[in-house]
Amino acid sequence: MTYIKPDPEKDYAIILGASSGFGEAVAMELAASGFNIVGIHLDRGSALTKVEQIKRQIQDKGVEALFFNINAASEQKRNEVLTRLKEHFAEKGNQGRVKVMLHSLAFGSLAPFIHNDPKERLSQKQMEMTLNVMAHSLVYWTRDIMLADLFGRGAKIYAMTSSGSTRVTPFYGAVSAAKAALESHVRQLALELAPYQITCNAIRAGVTFTPALRKIPGHETMIDIALSQIPFKRLTQPADIAKFICAQATSDEIWATGNIFNVDGGEICVAFHTPLRK
Ligand SMILES: NC(=O)c1ccc[n+]([C@@H]2O[C@H](COP(=O)([O-])OP(=O)(O)OC[C@H]3O[C@@H](n4cnc5c(N)ncnc54)[C@H](O)[C@@H]3O)[C@@H](O)[C@H]2O)c1
């Protein structure tokens, strides 16, 4: 594979979920390699101080940091961001192009399907919201970036998935459904985008200590199991994913598409059994 150096005059990466975890790490790595970063996130209060730090760190690498604090599942907000980006490219002489997009949104309802108390069980609204944010928004962002003619030739799209797409964990039903749908969307997009020389792949990360993981009831047990089995004897870190995506995105490789890449230090291939917890 040949390394293709990103051109900070033209090349942009859109990161959905840029203020934390994998999205933050990938934004930093791509910025360091020369991509301008368009960061989408949903934060308030003290978390916004961290967002300002991330933007400064990106700008310190000599590239742009265009950040939007919006609900990525809102059609109106998505259109506003893409209109702004189109205007920005026009101001720069219409050379800008989106070469990388990462879908790394964590916004799921963690509740059981079955419970006598309606307040405790997953509602229809929560199910739909989880699937909209964590799965379907990948399709809508990709489609609208295409329709706005913002993707560059050879653009690469990535979506963060997890072992929840095929395995069950208590409270994780809606997110599991979202991951299964997300992987299906990745395959469909790979098919439909190939004529435009655009690839789409899912990255299945191992258990990683991020704010999203810390919200899952029983995550301590998930960490213990992962650590007891993983050949590398440590958890996946956001930087592991960032390095993988950056290496892939800056290569001239265009033939891998529609895949689920396990980027997990071997966690999934040795995983034997996750005991069910209450
Ligand atoms: N942490 C893990 O162990 C793990 C493992 C495999 C896959 N994943 C997946 O990776 C993705 C990112 O997870 P993370 O652990 O980095 O989470 P995180 O909580 O660290 O980051 C989530 C990001 O999503 C943004 N976000 C959430 N809802 C949003 C919305 N509606 N609109 C715009 N932005 C929104 C947040 O602002 C934040 O930037 C998720 O899809 C998650 O399921 C996580």
Image (cartoon, helix red, strand yellow):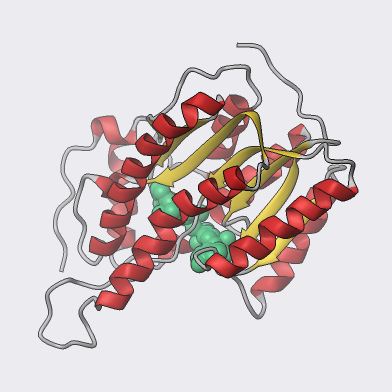
Instruction: Say left or right for 264 vs 110.
Output: right
Image coords of residue 61 (percent x, y): 84, 43
Image coords of residue 273 (percent x, y): 15, 43
Instruction: Give 56 or 34, whichever is nearer the viewer.
Output: 34
Instruction: Say left or right for 216 vs 34.
Output: left
Figure check: 155 above or below 148: above
Instruction: Give 34 or 127, whichever is nearer the viewer.
Output: 127
Residue 151 seen in the current view = yes
Image coords of residue 185 (percent x, y): 37, 43
Figure check: 156 above or below 170: above
Q: What residue do we see at 75% from left, 51% from top?
A: 86
Residue 210 seen in the current view = no
Q: What residue do we see at 77% from left, 61% from top?
A: 53
Q: What residue do we see at 17% from left, 71% from top?
A: 113
Residue 153 appears in which quarter of the rendering? Answer: top right
Tag count in the figure? Answer: 0
Residue 235 appears in which quarter of the rendering? Answer: top left
Figure check: 244 above or below 21: above
Instruction: Give 113 or 214, whichever is nearer the viewer.
Output: 113
Quadrant holding the C terminus = bottom left
Q: What residue do we see at 36% from left, 66% from top?
A: 130
